[in-house]
Image: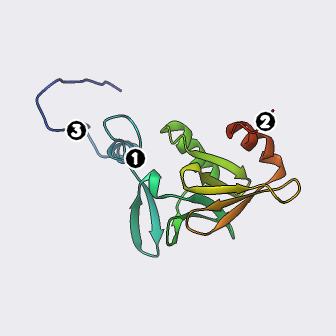
């Protein structure tokens, strides 16, 4: 694909795609570009409440979890359907530098910025308590990864 960057006086960067026809790949490319801010970071991700699409910033997301073969994104007050798999969200975080998200189990990815505290009083278990009053458990499989990320390893 040919690319070109033009330097001109404008209030904010914008992108125009020239194409002989509108294909599914071009549409997906346009959607990805439209969700990136000028620093290269993702601006929002879409959560769904039935037929309503709700754009969410990374800072709005407390955790992403799978339940009953569906993936949900939890915010301050609600859980919304996320139309991607958990591993796709994890890859998305890596691709768009969402550095505050870490996987704590096969079914949970959390946003560290919304963690109120980590309860380590239970033997061998870490309980994650969020500022919205909800919680999650770190699985044993991810325990060392979490301790390393939180600088808890000796």
Q: What SS does tag 3 mark?
A: loop
Which residue position holds label 1? 28
Residue located beneath label 3 in the image: 14
Instruction: Residue at 71%, 58% (x, y): give it.
Output: 107
Residue contact at pointers 1 and 2, CB within 8 angstroms: no
User: Mark 2 and mark 3: span between their CA atoms?
Assistant: 45 Å
Q: Residue furthest right?
A: 123
Residue marked by disc 2: 153
Residue 82, position in %: x, y? 53, 62
Secondary structure of residue under mark 1: helix
Query: Mark 1 to mark 2: distance in Å?
Result: 42 Å
Q: Earlier in the sequence, mark 1 or mark 2?
A: 1
Q: Which of the two marks, 1 or 2, is nearer to us in this view?
A: 2
Q: Nearer the viewer, residue 11 or 120?
A: 120
Q: Quadrant of residue 13?
A: top left
Q: Is residue 150 above or below residue 45?
A: above
| Residue at the outermost left position | 9
N-terminal-most mark, 3 or 1? 3
Residue 134: x, y in percent? 63, 68
Viewer-nearest of labels 3 and 1? Answer: 3
């Amino acid at each position: 694909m040919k690319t070109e960057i033009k330097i001109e006086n404008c209030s904010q960067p914008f992108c125009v795609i020239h194409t002989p026809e509108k294909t599914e790949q071009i549409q997906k490319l346009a959607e990805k570009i439209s969700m990136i801010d000028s620093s290269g970071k993702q601006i929002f991700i879409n959560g769904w409440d039935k037929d309503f699409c709700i754009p969410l910033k990374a800072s709005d997301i407390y955790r992403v979890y799978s339940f009953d073969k569906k993936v949900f994104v939890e915010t301050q007050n609600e859980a919304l359907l996320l139309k991607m798999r958990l591993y796709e969200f994890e890859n998305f975080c890596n691709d768009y530098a969402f550095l505050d998200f870490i996987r704590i189990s096969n079914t949970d990815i959390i946003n560290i910025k919304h963690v109120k505290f980590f309860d380590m009083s239970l033997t061998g278990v870490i309980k994650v308590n969020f500022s919205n009053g909800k919680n999650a458990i770190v699985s044993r499989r991810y325990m060392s990864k979490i301790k390393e990320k939180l600088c808890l390893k000796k």
